[in-house]
Amino acid sequence: MKVTLRVWRQPGPDAAGEMVSYEVEDVTPEMSFLEVLDTLNERLILDGSEPVAFDHDCREGICGACGVVINGQAHGPERTTACQLHMRSFADGDVIDVEPWRAAAFPVVKDLVVDRSAFDRIIGAGGYITAPTGSAPDAHATPVPKPAAETAFEHAECIGCGACVAACPNGSAMLFTAAKVVHLGALPQGAPERESRVLDMIGRMDDEGFGGCTNTGECAVACPKGIPLQAISSLNREFLRAARKSA
Amino acid sequence: MSPTYAQYTEGEPVADAAAPPGDIAERWDRRRFTARLVNPANRRRYKVIVVGTGLAGGAAGATLAEQGYQVVQFCYQDSPRRAHSIAAQGGINAAKNYRNDGDSVHRLFYDTVKGGDFRARESNVRRLAQVSVEIIDQCVAQGVPFAREYGGLLDTRSFGGVQVSRTFYARGQTGQQLLLGAYQALSRQIEAGNVEMHPRTEMLDLVVVDGRARGIVARDLVTGRIETHLADAVVLATGGYGNVFYLSTNAKNSNATAIWRAHRRGAYFANPCFTQIHPTCIPRSGDHQSKLTLMSESLRNDGRIWVPKAHGDGRPPNAIPEDERDYYLERLYPSFGNLVPRDIASRAAKNVCDEGRGVGPGGQGVYLDFADAIRRLGRAAVEERYGNLFEMYERITAEDPYQVPMRIYPAIHYTMGGLWVDYDLQTTVPGLFAIGEANFSDHGANRLGASALMQGLADGYFILPATIGDFLARHRPEEVSPDHPAVAEAVADTEDRLHLLLSVDGDRTPDSFHRELGELLWDECGMARTEPGLRKALERIPALREEFWRRIKVPGTGTELNQSLEKANRIADYLELAELMCLDALHRAESCGGHFREESQTPDGEAARDDEQFSYAAAWEFTATGTAPVLHREDLAFEYVIPTQRSYQ
Amino acid sequence: MPRALLTVTVMALTTKSASKPTDGKRAPGKPAPAPDRPKRYPPSLPALLWHSTVGKKTVLAVTGLIMVGYLVAHLVGNLKIFFGAEEFNSYGHWLRTLGGPVLHYEWALWMIRVVLVAAVVLHGVTAYQLSRRDIAARPVAYVHKRRRASYATRTMRWGGVILGLFVVWHILDLTTLTVNENAETGHPYENTVATFSTWYGNTIYITAMVALGLHLRHGFWSAVQTLGAASPARERALRVVTDTSALVLTCGFISIPVAVMTGVVN
């Protein structure tokens, strides 16, 4: 296979960027999308040019480091992460546009690398259960009904890749925030901080410059882990409940 | 003529002076009692550097900050949530005995020492088993969504040939959930200002002042700035070195630079040849392959492993009749069959592939066939048990395992070796601690399934926070001048090295060297090792290293985000570490756990341990690059678990 | 003691800050210091709602639902036009005497108008503020354009503007009768027929009602989602309710100009 990559190149945070075309030959259907970028980079290095910078690490779809917009879709055409996207999803001769996540809260660092630290700060604002080491009661002290544990798990699967923000026309982080609020809220251990958690996390989310939710549903479509759109409704409910109780 | 690298010398034995004597069941409690404490009001004056934010580092950073120390923490990833602990699938062991199936702290201790093929330190393993119980409590309190039964209590499963059900899990994403628990606790401390977090910052050297670890030199990966961070103690939680093989199940950027730099600054490196190979990984599909993906071992419960009897049989698997298939594990190990331990299954696969009977691209694979299971149990039952794994396999290979047998091949996925530490997890450099996979302590020559997560969290949440206090209490919080010659020297070393990498401007990419080194190491220091092979590798590695420094090409500058520079700098360290691994493998002329020397096997082809000669941990002291290191033995005494030979026939 | 404290301070100063000047601007990839935000929440519920995007969305949803409720009543009243001039005109008169004799003439109507105006203003202001924020949150567009979301979802903003303008025209036409061809106070039936006897009256009205349908289709469901009332079990039923009500309201309103045009009402 031979494909043409049109890649966003931007030397630094404040520099101007542009799309640059590269032809990559010797692409096989078994290759992952990131391996095509690897192949391109090997050639660029030997040509004496700057390789394309992109974030990646585990390449198993779990660390959440990778993430690029491929042909206008976060993580590309399959419902998975870019590292688990294989070239068999493309055809010989395809022209593929590769762009970084676009959001005010995720400024571009270089090429396809963006700064997602705003997510860490949302978690820091309240996305935890306060349980200092050593203070825990026996694990069986509080049984957790299986459905609650399942709900918690399904929302805890979020890998923090930022595809939801990248896909949202408003650059909103509601699905990310909702996933954590629902995860912790579903468990009895999360109950004591239920109100402060949601108010603090939403407050921080707003402060970081993410947009609001207009319920377009794009986030849930892009989410490689299948966090349901419903989570946002639950987040809204939690917020209103907390607002009533706290104000 | 100067001595070659292989002509190492032997120094004084090294002993673990920190473990208290007496009944093993009371040692940890006694150690905690004898440890000096830092007055809570004084803790704020101590600064502790923690490098890495995986299970061990994340847990340690959060806990030390809760205790009141100033923590300065680093990770090379863009967020502390991405450390590779996140990829662990199976579960975490704990001696809770919730099943009432005869489990106990002592049994977990026993299983771990035996599983490690009697090359681990008893005191440490006993403590690990004891602390395992508290880990589950801690994680549940944090909101880790472990699998539960309908009654609301925690579910467990059995794992890796152990006879009790003590593995707690969260579907196939246990590592992710545990790591996020630690990450959230850490995030809370970052927000509170107790942890100063430096993401996208990589440690490149250790600062040792007057024989004591006092800080690190790090590179801000975004701006390229070289920074010095000084503190009262340094904790390395930087994981293992499996990526030295290029193809492994480690994350692409996992690296050995932090521990290797610490080794160069005086920390002994123990048992570097103890690497673990996982038998059920998806084989490589071509030369472009950048990493390997592991699939849970549980697949071997119902899948049958085979290769064609004929050499170079190119027919599709379903066209090969039953009597022309060799179910080699069932043939060689009739009583354990497909469920032999990891190392044995891996070696057997290598042997049949070496014979030319491997399948798939390059003949590097064997079939894992579910046709019988589907016939016996029905497709629905197989789907329920392994559905997610089958899906993952199909996404990567585009082959439907319900129709065509899976292809699997072993891959490197864990390293038992690491920095030598005493019972307090302190290295031979005072003030430098190593926790998690970065140290060598608990798994001996082979790690049991679901024990890596246990060890990381035990070290991070419970052990280090107790022992580091003792060290700090013995030292006043004193400043180190940033102008101290040792600081300036470490900075200059780092800058020179990066400058050199950038200025060679040769004609080979960093990855090309990494691949070459990885292939060499996989062939000679992988699943089966021989003296001639290791000697060959020991000749080849220095030549490759020399070529690296002559022909490496790193584009760009050092003052920007430069991923090629990051890579090249890590590979430079692999080129030194690989040499030590081969030397360690050569010197250990026995087979044990993950280390299989073809010269040392039973008549049946099993690993033959040599307790007479090798019942010790090999701690290596660095001398100079390419120069023979000094071996320090730590003799291992087994008072509670008596060494026996493993047999799976 | 002070010496020890000084030591710590010096250490802190000589580590990171020595090598990294703080120019007040955050380097990408580095965490920003925690934003200066009061940890405690605003003192009152309205303030809390007004200061967050989710709160503003709540205002948007509640005001939207108030308007939906009004539209349902309005449609029911409008459909009386099919029963002839007398019934329709007397309904118009009843609206003005609603609440009597306790309430004075038109008082009830004015109360409704005040609530509606408040709803429209709040709806418009929050929508404007949220839109500004949303656009700012995505300052750079993707080069590769791709159709996103449904037509109804993508047209919420302009649809809302169209509806706002329509309301102004609608009031000038049939309430104040400023632009009405007939402009006969107390004779809404004749005035309505007059409007729908002009080509532009029909065009404006029908266009606006289509926009209303689209706005409701996404807006009604979105409001339910925003108020946290959606759940997986209710998802299907909710979609049916919101889609049906959007369709019924649109068709119901459009039936009147169609009836005038076809001579069913004259």
Image (cartoon, helix red, strand yellow):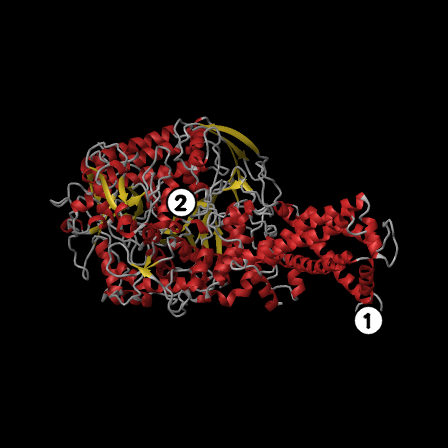
The x and y percentages for residue B452 are 32, 53
The one nearer the camera, C60 or B619, is C60
- Circle 1 packing at 10 Å, graded few (<14), some (14-19), many (20+), is few
Whether residue B236 is situated above or below residue A198 in the rendered picture: above
Residue type, label 1: Gly
Callouts 1 and 2 close, C-beta under 8 Å:
no
- Circle 2 packing at 10 Å, graded few (<14), some (14-19), many (20+), is many
* Chain holding disc 1: C
Q: Is residue B608 visible?
A: yes
The residue to which callout 1 is attached is C100
The x and y percentages for residue B542 are 29, 33
Residue B463's quadrant in the figure? Answer: bottom left
The one nearer the camera, B409 or B558, is B409
Residue placed furthest toward the front: C264
The quarter of the picture where the C terminus of chain A appears is bottom right
* Chain holding disc 2: A
SS assignment at label 1: loop
Left or right for B239, reference C182: left
Q: Residue at x 83, y 60 (%)?
A: C86
The x and y percentages for residue B506 are 40, 27
Q: Is residue C17 visible?
A: no
Residue type, label 2: Glu
- Labels 1 and 2 positioned on one and the same chain: no
The x and y percentages for residue C41 are 61, 64
Q: Which mark is residue C34?
A: none
Q: Residue at x 51, y 62 (%)?
A: C2
SS assignment at label 2: loop
Q: Nearer the viewer, mark 1 or mark 2?
A: 1
The one nearer the camera, B640 or B580, is B640
The residue to which callout 2 is attached is A60
The quarter of the picture where the N terminus of chain A appears is top left
Q: What's the distance in space between the residues labelled 1 and 2, CA to CA? A: 72 Å
